[in-house]
Amino acid sequence: MRRASLFAFALVVALIASSALCQPSGLVRVEVLADGTAHVVYTFPTNGSASVDLGLVGLPDPSLLILVRNEKGDTLPYAVNETAGLMTIVALDSSQVTVDYYTSTIVSKISGRWIINFTTPLPATVKLPPNATLSALYVVPTSITAEGQSVVLTYPPGPVVVAYVLPPAIKPPTPSPQAPSGAQTTPPATGAPEVKPSTQGQAGGAQQAPGALLYAAAAIVALAVLAVLLVVRRRGSKEGLSEVDEQILNLLKQSGGGLFQSELTSLVGLPTTTVWRHVRKLESMGLVAVEKRMGRNFVRLTRRP
């Protein structure tokens, strides 16, 4: 009985050790490209395990090539569980595995900043795009180095969150037109009259261009002066008009162009003498005319201010 207990205990210890050995250890390299796509490369030993469950850094892009190979370069079968974010690899007769894929699920752009966010099962290096500038370190890396024009950060297993910005794109200068490579540049043969291209048309065009510009500028100035005169004329017609004057004119417009003085007085709501004074003022300005109709004063709108 005691031997059986010891055997069972030894078996449990062996299973725990075997499970620990099956856990991959190695390195994952993440290179972020300028468009936000990331190139992910795992390298880890199998520790003699026939299969390995690998936690993924982002989901592999199925439209791009996914490579899973051993140390001999042989392709290994695998299956991806997108829900769990795991890749199960059959690693028979393999001592080391390399997983290579591209993902677009770990980098996002928010308000002009690019943010990298993932959890790594292995020690990881993150290489930013060339000329990228660190904006924020939400998880402190173990080291920060430079590789060419790129910043490289090193992280232990666990979360990785970092923000960076890219410089604005610079448009290349427009190249100046060049003569065709097959154009003849040698002088004419001896004895043949040298024919020079006429520059009269070019000179005339050069002289006409400033003239056309002057005509266009004069037209623009004339239009501007006309617009100013119209504005001034419109404003001048309204100078000296009181609120009552404006009310009388609006009532005449709304009534179709004319009202009897008694009707106008009733609508304005002021004494007859006050309304008549404003009507005579508008008449002197040429805005209204007073006519006699059936022995009553009819105020007619002559023109709008």
Image: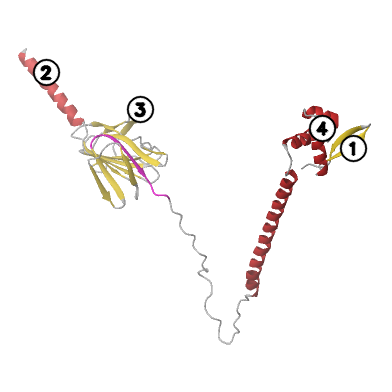
Find out whether residue 129 is within the magenta segment: no
Q: What residue type is labelled 1?
A: Glu
Q: Could you tell whether 263 is left or right of 98 in the image?
A: right
Residue located at (15% from left, 27% from top)? 17
Element on which disc 4 rests: helix
Element on which disc 2 rests: helix
Disc 3 or 1, which lies upstream in sequence? 3
Q: Are marks 2 and 4 in contact (CB under 8 Å)?
A: no
Residue located at (14% from left, 21% from top)? 12
**Residue denoted by label 1:** 291
- Return the residue nearer the eye: 41 or 196: 196
Percent coordinates x, y for residue 261 in the rendering: 85, 32
Q: Please identify the quadrant where the N terminus is shown.
A: top left
Disc 4 or 3, which lies upstream in sequence? 3
Residue 251 lies in quadrant: top right
**Residue denoted by label 3:** 83
Relative to residue 201, is residue 255 depicted above or below?
A: above
**Residue denoted by label 2:** 8
**Distance (Cα) linking label 2 and label 1:** 125 Å
Q: What stretch is highlighted in magenta?
A: 156-168
**Residue denoted by label 4:** 273
- Return the residue nearer the eye: 144 or 181: 144
Q: Do the residues labelled 4 and 1 touch (CB within 8 Å)?
A: no
Q: Which of marks 4 and 3 is in front?
A: 4
**Distance (Cα) linking label 4 and label 3:** 90 Å
